[in-house]
Amino acid sequence: MLALSEYYRQKNLTMFVMLISFMLLLTAGSVTGTYIRNMDWASEKTLWEDAMNKAPGRVRPLANLATEHYKKIGDYDKALELYNKALTLKSHKQDFEKRISILNNTASIWHSKGEYGKAAVIYKQILSEVPGHINAHYNIILSLMAGGKWNEALHYADVLVSRQYIKPQYWNIRGLILLNQEKPDQAFSDFEKALEIKPGYWEALFNTAVSLSMQKKYNQADTLLNRTNKIRPENILNLLYLIENSLKMNDKKLTLQYIEKLFASFSIIEIKAVMNRLPGNDLYIPFSNKLLMPAVQQRLEKES
């Protein structure tokens, strides 16, 4: 009996070992397969390339490859190539939203490349198809402003603030347009409306100070600019406009004080970077280059 029981015990043990070995092989195969699949799906690029290869006639894989990879890494030319290819494909009904997204991304890339006219044309196309597309409506204003087309930008801003749902940003951007059209009194009214919706809205407070300075209300502007500077001391534009406002006041002592504060608060690299942008006025704040540039440039030369 003992010999027979030992036989069965050994036999069961052998079967158990074989079963464990088989399971380990299955697990290893599964892990290997999972690893290979993970290699295929290791990034957004490989994911959407795989989807594009499997469905070459679909809009979505092309658009997602452009957005999730090439646009993210800043390869705008490749992103535009894929977007344009996607737009030539026959869209399914469910791809309409994706198509509008492609147009929006294409316009934003042209804006980033400094091709503001091309961006505006595409935003107009979006608005012709989806008149209520708020992002396109807001962004076309930015492109028109960047291209210096202030009258057309004002037209779109007028439409934006006429809508039932109004954000403070809409009044603020309309006010910025009016500042650049040298209508500071009208701009002041827009900034007030922005602040009624959102009290303490920093951009509107700062722009209000600019409008006061442009109306030659220099002391009021100085007081408000000092207030906004305390709220956001990291914003270099605030100190630059304090300098400009003091120059308009012809207060040399105050100008020197603000210049000292500027160079104590920001590095020379930061100051140069902003000053290089002022002549093109892509900051939308109407600085007086004839006043501000020489004053800051003189100090930059001393620091160099």
Image: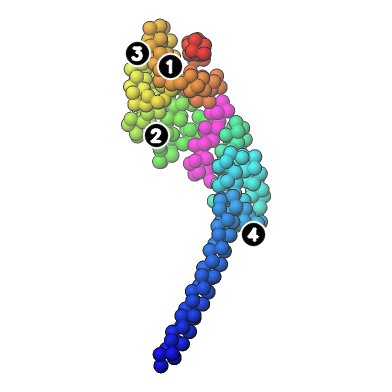
- Give the Cα separation between the discs numbered 3 and 2: 26 Å
The answer to whether marks 1 and 3 mark residues whose Cβ atoms lie closer than 8 Å is: no
For marks 4 and 3, the one nearer the N-term is 4
- Which residue is label 4 attached to? 54
Query: Which percent across, then down, holds residue 280?
Result: 56, 22
- Which residue is label 2 attached to? 168
- Which residue is label 3 attached to? 219
For marks 2 and 1, the one nearer the N-term is 2
Q: Is residue 132 magenta?
A: yes
For marks 2 and 4, the one nearer the N-term is 4
Q: Secondary structure at mark 1?
A: helix
Closer to the observer: label 1 or label 3?
Answer: 1
Q: Secondary structure at mark 2?
A: helix
Q: Is residue 154 magenta?
A: no
Q: Is residue 195 above or below residue 211?
A: below
- Give the Cα separation between the discs numbered 1 and 3: 23 Å
Q: Which residues are magenta?
A: 126-151
The answer to whether marks 2 and 4 mark residues whose Cβ atoms lie closer than 8 Å is: no
Query: Which percent across, then down, holds residue 22?
Result: 53, 74
For marks 3 and 2, the one nearer the N-term is 2
- Give the Cα separation between the discs numbered 4 and 3: 67 Å
Per the picture, the main secondary structure of the magenta-coloured stretch is helix
The answer to whether marks 2 and 1 mark residues whose Cβ atoms lie closer than 8 Å is: no
- Give the Cα separation between the discs numbered 2 and 4: 46 Å
Residue found 48% across the figure and 41% down from its top: 134
Residue found 60% across the figure and 44% down from its top: 70
Q: Nearer the viewer, residue 23 or 60?
A: 23
Closer to the observer: label 3 or label 2?
Answer: 3
- Which residue is label 1 attached to? 263
